[in-house]
Image (cartoon, grey):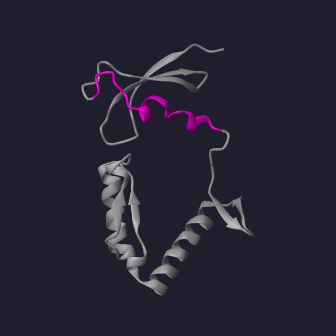
Amino acid sequence: MGETKKVKTICGYCGTGCGLILEVKDNQITRVRGDKDAPVNQGQTCIKGALGYHYMHAEERLTEPHVRKGGKLVPTSWEEALSLVANKFHDIKTSFGSDALSIFACARATNETNFVTQKFARAVLGTNNIDGCNRT
């Protein structure tokens, strides 16, 4: 068994920027605690920051794109998955208009990523229907 390492990082669950200390053993996160030296959270964490790391090593975690074929999700290439999504967006926009589409932005993303997301929604999809999880 390997030695436990302490890794300082920034929480990625929202835009607050809380400092965390990860305890990592054998390339697996074993514990998370707040960084007392971090000016934003001074060692405190919310439940997501403290306990939301288990998904990283979950057996059920998807590691490749999937599409539904014959009622079942099956692994596919990125090219096929992205083509399917682009075609579905096009079909919906053509059949029902731009306001039938919407984008859900992510508070965990950077400002730059959210800027590009809203630009995509407005310039490509032609919709102003944009929301995000920032309010939760």
Q: Residue at x 72, y 67 (%)?
A: 71
Across and down, in percent, residue 135 comes to 32, 50
Across and down, in percent, residue 10 comes to 37, 32
The residue at the far right in this view is 70
Quadrant for residue 43, please give it.
Answer: top left
Across and down, in percent, residue 99 comes to 38, 78
98 shown above or below 6: below
The residue at the far left in this view is 39
Quadrant for residue 113, please give it.
Answer: bottom left
Residue 2 highlighted magenta (yes or no): no
Q: Which of 7 and 69 is in front in this view?
A: 69
The residue at the far bottom in this view is 95
Q: Residue at x 56, y 37 (%)?
A: 56
Magenta residue span = 41-58
Quadrant for residue 28, please give it.
Answer: top right
**Which quadrant: the N terminus?**
top right
Instruction: Please indicate whether residue 17 sits to the left or right of residue 29 in the image.
Output: left
Q: Which residue is drawn at 36% across and 61% down?
A: 117
Across and down, in percent, residue 66 comes to 65, 59
Residue 56 highlighted magenta (yes or no): yes
